[in-house]
Amino acid sequence: MAIPMENLLEGLNPQQREAVTWNQGSALILAGAGSGKTRVLTTRMAWLMATGKNRPEELLAVTFTNKAAREMMTRLSSMGGWPVRSLWVGTFHGLCHRFLRLHALDAGLTPQFQIIDGQEQLAALKRVMKALNFDEERVNPRQLQNFVNGHKEQGLRAENAVVSHSAQRPLQEAYLAYEAQCQREGTVDFAELLLRCVELWQHHPVLREHYQARFKTLLVDEFQDTNPLQYRWLRLLCGPASTVFAVGDDDQSIYSFRGAEIENMRHFERDYGVTRVLRLEQNYRSLGTILEAANALIQHNAGRFGKTLWTEGARGELIRVYEGETDGDEARFIAHTVTELRDQGGRLSDMVLLYRSNAQSRALEQALFSLNLPYRVHGGLRFFERQEIRHALAYLRLAVSAEDDAAFLRVINFPPRGIGARSLENLQIEAQTLRSSLFQATRVSSLAGKAGQGVQRFLQGIDQLAELIHQGQDLPRVIQAVLEFSGLLEHYRQDKEGADRIANLEELVAAAVAFTQEEGSGDVLSFLAHATLETGEHGAAPGSEAIQMMTVHAAKGLEFEVVFVAGLEDGLFPHENALQETRGLEEERRLAYVALTRARRQLYLTHAQSRVLHGQVRYGVRSRFLEEIPESLCHILNPRVKRSELSFGTRAPTSVRFPASPTESAKAGRFHIGQRVRHDKFGEGVVLAREGQGNEGRVQVNFRDVGMKWLALAFARLTSL
DNA sequence: TTGAAGTAGATTTTT
DNA sequence: TCTACTTCAA
């Protein structure tokens, strides 16, 4: 044993210790925010192994994110000398993928099956609709996607779909056709990974019993986020002699729109004979006042398991509440405060700016920018989601599986080879009569002769690629070959803005090198799965000194010294779509609870009297969630002053305190925000926003005559007035 | 094949 | 009001 037992349990509080050493069957651990949940989970695994209760191969731990899975692995390996790499620790999707690769044929899949992400799924559904001659007016592709995923998350195939209105008939029909199309093309979407796995075990009792006997302990992280399909998955995998160790927090359930059901926690109690729920309530993250506020807020929800966070630490400062006059004012307040905190020695990377919806980031970014504060917005495109990367990988996919029409369509005319919509239509017809894939149809079609060498070269290139893969050529070299023959590099070299894309393509080769080293093999299929399943972190680059900006959803699981929550108005947060029913409102409240509990030391809650939304000025009321936090915990920064009492005439106090003054924003460069400028063609205007550095960036200018324009500084002839 | 022009849709999104 | 996407003309 790598670590003696005493050391393993050392430093755990009594509740954590009880959870770790639980010995009475399945357990449900109610783990509050910042209560050391991951530590308990990993120590539990280590304890099971150290006591000889389980051998490593008898454990299976499942999480929702790759990050969480990695964190568990890292902690485990720091705890001792177990063969961590051989452990079954991963995301639901990652583990399902593993099972399905092992038993592809039994699951009714081609061994070359490819995983598609949400975007590719949407594209696939649009193709289905086209094939069925469905009007995008009548059936909305997004709605169809929700229909499909919603059903899959409930474990329902198209044939069993719930069709309550006649308007849903077409949706079911499309779902049915989509299933067939995926089967034909050898693609599997995210929900399908789970569903196939469940069906695999249902249809193959021998397999199911094998795994049931093998995995003695199943550990589940973030249990409150499981959907019915995942619940069933777990139920099937858990054998008569196995136990489940489920860790979750009903108060942090914020993904019901993705099919998650908190009720699963109640079902769990019932189905797994849980007699006592263990609670981790001691919080190691936040100061007392912050916890008090969070506790008070969440108490307004009904039907909770119930828990109260507490800390041995100090109470800390009061929560600062600021009411802006406008959203711009709110943003300037935050930017000013950030500056102050930084000047007092605070680190920007210890601060986060949270909001309910991405649309809010704009105004906030503008304010930060004009004070020259570096910021980092989370939630943009991730590495493997970039267009050029998708293209490159599509070539790879096509080489692996000629049936993959989605991949074919992505690359047949990119870079352009003169294959227009017309030729594609003909191809499609040809493929249909031949009952073959588009790629195969291309081989025999007249198009190959007519449209000339481009297509010939394309066909040959894919064949050669397939040959390289067949020979076992190493992955980076295969990708290099893709880049060369496809013409992607050449294409982006012609493109004015292609430099970044070329850099990313080179990065792809680097990623392949890294992957090959980590995995110890350069299997193309594994790499493609990796690309879809692990879309690449888009978190702040480590070491970058910038304030982070993200939605509250994205902040779950993270913590920061200082947290700003902006836009606390009814209609925004809680969001208006959720105001109707209690369930929705309660989820919004949990979301607010998540937001508050991200803070270690300082918490700022802000809102605005008016804000511009969808181009219209909206007058908001302060969020009910603010009212639910005891006033005694708050320091209201701007006690309401009646306009008539002001000596500034019509100006409100807030706009006096936080002006977007030129002196502050001038630092932003030659064209600072608020700067009046002239353009040869557009006339006079005012700079409203700016992106990028120096001459590389672009500015948004509101021209008196022609309105708003974004102008690249490198090209636009702008003169300051 | 590109660009302009028009139009729907605008919460959150671990995989 | 903005943007992302489709449609239409050249």
Image: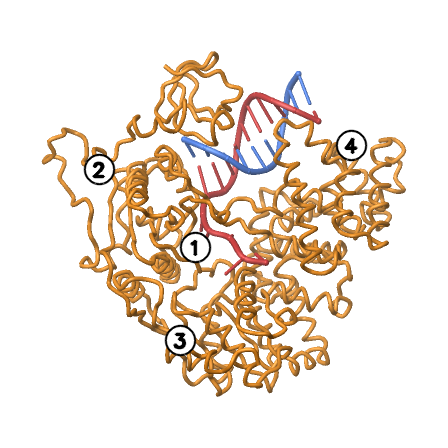
Chain colours: A orange, B red, C blue
Above or below A59: residue A651: above
Check disc 4: other Cα within 10 Å, few if <14, some if 14-19, many if 20+. some
Q: Is residue A486 visible?
A: yes
Query: Label 2: which residue?
Result: A654
Q: Earlier in the sequence, mark 3 or mark 1?
A: 3
What's under tag 2, amino acid-wise?
Answer: Thr
Q: Which of marks 2 and 1 is nearer the N terminus?
A: 1
Marks 4 and 1: in contact by CB < 8 Å? no
Marks 4 and 3: in contact by CB < 8 Å? no
Distance between the alpha carbons at the discs numbered 3 and 4:
65 Å
Q: Residue A588's quadrant in the figure? A: bottom left
Q: Mark 3, chain letter?
A: A
Residue A315 badge:
none
Q: Residue A251's quadrant in the figure? A: bottom left
Residue A555 badge:
1
Question: Residue A676 in the image: x percent, y percent?
Answer: 36, 19
What's under tag 3, amino acid-wise?
Answer: Gly
Residue A417 badge:
4
* Residue shown at the point (28%, 40%) measured from the top left: A333
